[in-house]
Amino acid sequence: MSSGISEEDLIAGFLGNKISVVEEPVVPEVPKPETATTCCMYCEKDFVFEIKRGSKPKLCSDECKAANRKSKKKPKEKIVRMHKCASCTRQIVQRGKGGTRVYCGVCREERRKAAYKKYRQKNKVVVEREQGNCQMCGCSLGVLKGRGRVRKYCPDCYRKKRNQKSREYEKRKYQPIVRSYQCEKCNQTFEQAGKGKLRKHCEGCS
């Protein structure tokens, strides 16, 4: 039934017994949060916020908070230091918070080369190789010290072989020059090879 009383309860009421009434549970009402409106200090737009304990918000969103924080951030001052090189009279201009440099760029490069040279001399391993005999005259080429290429010819034979290769190359590259000339006596045209002065008379008229 709509009143929440069953038939058994009605019969019990007529008979003089107590009626058991079922009460519905009461749901407590959740109070709505109080809100207010204010203006954002960065974008200057009105926004609604929930009233809580403490001071009211001044920025409407996370974007405005990040932008406002970035605008108030002061740029760092550039640290510039000047001091004299310990090896020469040059002035070193150094920027930033790194360690102080003792030498200028030129002196540092010279000291690096000197240290590397000293290290190489200290840890140098001499490589010695037998070069055998010359392939042209058969003389001994001795022992080669270092990591260079092993020689095949002695200095004299190497010079001769180099000159021979140069002559062969020039011969392959050479193109003869042929010019024509007219004899002044017989008025006939002949050909002359080479770069010399043109002839005036042919072999028969000269």
Image (tube, rainbow, N blue to C red):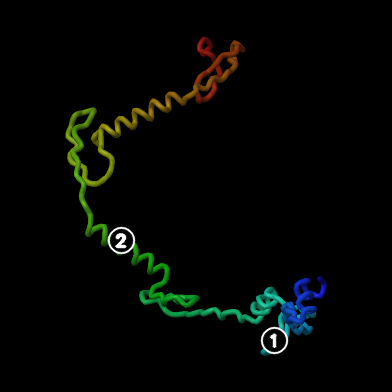
**Mark 1 sits on what residue?**
52
Label drawn at residue 202: none
State the CA–CA distance, disc 2 to disc 1: 71 Å
- Residue depicted at x 21% and y 52%: 125
Q: Nearer the viewer, residue 119 or 201?
A: 119
Q: Residues within 10 Å of mark 2 (few under 14, many from 20)?
A: few
Evaluate whether residue 71 shows in this view: yes
Residue 79, position in %: x, y?
51, 80
161 shown above or below 191: below
- Residue depicted at x 82% and y 72%: 2
Residue 26, position in %: x, y?
73, 80
Q: Determine the image quadrant of residue 62.
A: bottom right
Secondary structure of the residue carrying tag 1 is loop
Q: Nearer the viewer, residue 3 or 174?
A: 3
Q: Residues within 10 Å of mark 1 (few under 14, many from 20)?
A: few
The three-letter amino acid code for the residue at tag 2 is: Tyr
Q: Residue furthest right?
A: 2
Q: Determine the image quadrant of residue 76.
A: bottom right
Q: Earlier in the sequence, mark 2 or mark 1?
A: 1
Label drawn at residue 116: 2
Q: Is residue 78 left or right of residue 170?
A: right
The three-letter amino acid code for the residue at tag 1 is: Lys
Quarter of the image with the N terminus in it: bottom right
- Residue depicted at x 39% and y 25%: 168
Q: Is residue 150 left or right of residue 170?
A: left
Q: Residue furthest front?
A: 15
Residue 188, position in %: x, y?
60, 11
